[in-house]
Image: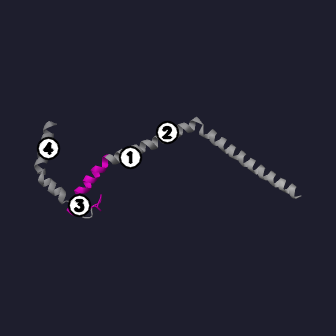
Amino acid sequence: MSTAKTHAVKKSIINKNLLQKLMKNDIISLFNRILSSPKLHTRTRSWAWIITRTIFVLGFCFIILYPVLIMISKAFMDFVDIYDNTVLLVPKHFTLMNIYLAGKMINYPVALRNSMVLAIGVT
């Protein structure tokens, strides 16, 4: 009896292994059929292109706009914040003194008047 029982157990183990292999093969063939469909390839390629294009556009926007954001941020920083390495974009001490001094140094009212006269005269 023990030999027959052992033989039956071995046979059931072999049947389970065979069943598992068949199931794996069926699943693999199903995935192969799904992945080989031309509609999926077109859809996958279009989504891949959309994602790639979005990453590139956002990357280029960041590269172009980051220096502008830094300059605008520095315009509103106090002298202490400009030389403080812990302050990056948001100033700890907000001030408009930098803009006032820049306008005063370039004589902004006269430059604005000259630009307006030129623009109105040309148009």
Residue at numbered disc 2: 46
Q: Quadrant of residue 28?
A: top right
Which numbered disc flags the more N-terminal residue, 4 or 3? 3
Query: Quick one: SS at disc 1?
Result: helix
In the displayed structure image, the side of residue 42 where residue 18 appears, left or right? right
**Membership of 118 in magenta stretch:** no
Answer few, some or many: residues within 10 Å of disc 1's Cα (few below 14, many 20 plus, some between 14 and 19): few
Report how many numbered discs are placed on residues in the image: 4
Which numbered disc flags the more N-terminal residue, 1 or 2? 2
Residue at numbered disc 4: 115
Residue in front for this viewpoint, 9 or 63? 9
Query: Quick one: SS at disc 4?
Result: helix
Residue in front for this viewpoint, 73 or 117? 73
Residue at numbered disc 1: 58
Q: Start and end of the magenta stretch? A: 64-90
At 55% across and 37% down in the image, what residue appears?
41
Q: Specify the quadrant that holds the N terminus.
A: bottom right
Q: Amino acid at mark 2?
A: Ser
Q: Amino acid at mark 4?
A: Ser
State how far apart marks 1 and 3 are (Cα).
30 Å
Q: Give x and y (percent) for residue 118.
A: 13, 40
State how far apart marks 4 and 3 are (Cα).
34 Å
Q: Give x and y (percent) for residue 13.
A: 77, 52
In the displayed structure image, the side of residue 116 where residue 28 appears, left or right? right
Residue at numbered disc 3: 83
State how far apart marks 1 and 2 are (Cα).
18 Å
State how far apart marks 3 and 2 are (Cα).
47 Å
At 67% across and 45% down in the image, what residue appears?
27
Which numbered disc flags the more N-terminal residue, 2 or 4? 2
